[in-house]
Image (cartoon, helix red, strand yellow):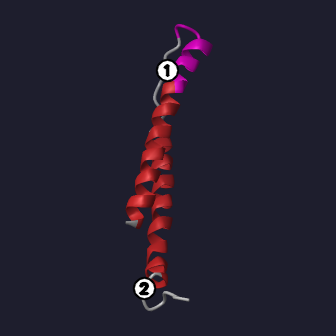
Amino acid sequence: MVLLESALPLVLAATLAAVAGFGVAEPLIDALAMKSASTAMPGPVYFASLGGGLAASLLVILTTLPLLRRMTTPDNARFE
């Protein structure tokens, strides 16, 4: 459940941000660039760094799962 509540929004937000970025960039490039200039997609280094950042975020989520499991076991729950 923790993965569903944390990883899914992270992936959806990253995807939406990438799509919005490309959607905003195209009209801006058309407005500012010379009409004869061609536009190119970012290179593989850009996409690798994007994927690396997303993987690092998912890794942080995964590393917190054992701690969360220990803290939420019924033995450790405090009923006052």
Secondary structure of the residue carrying numbered label 1: loop
- The residue at which mark 1 appears reads as 39
Q: Amino acid at mark 2?
A: Thr
The residue depicted at 44 percent of the width and 74 percent of the height is: 65
Badge 1 density bin: few <14, some 14–19, many ≥20, Cα 10 Å: few
Q: Is residue 39 above or below residue 56?
A: above
Screen quadrant of the N terminus: bottom left
Whether pointer 1 and pointer 2 mark residues with C-beta atoms closer than 8 Å, the reply is: no
- The residue at which mark 2 appears reads as 73
The residue depicted at 47 percent of the width and 45 percent of the height is: 14
The image quarter containing residue 29 is top right
Image position, residue 56 (x, y; %): 49, 60
Cα–Cα span, label 1 and label 2? 55 Å
The residue depicted at 40 percent of the width and 63 percent of the height is: 3
Q: Which of pointers 1 and 2 indicates the residue nearer the eye?
A: 2
Q: Is residue 40 above or below residue 8?
A: above
Magenta: main secondary structure: helix
Q: Is residue 28 above or below residue 13?
A: above
The residue depicted at 50 percent of the width and 32 percent of the height is: 20
Q: Is residue 66 magenta?
A: no
Which residues are the magenta region? 24-36
N-term mark: 1 or 2: 1
Badge 2 density bin: few <14, some 14–19, many ≥20, Cα 10 Å: few
Screen quadrant of the C terminus: bottom right
Q: Is residue 35 magenta?
A: yes
Q: How many marks?
A: 2
Q: Amino acid at mark 1?
A: Thr
Image position, residue 42 (x, y; %): 48, 33
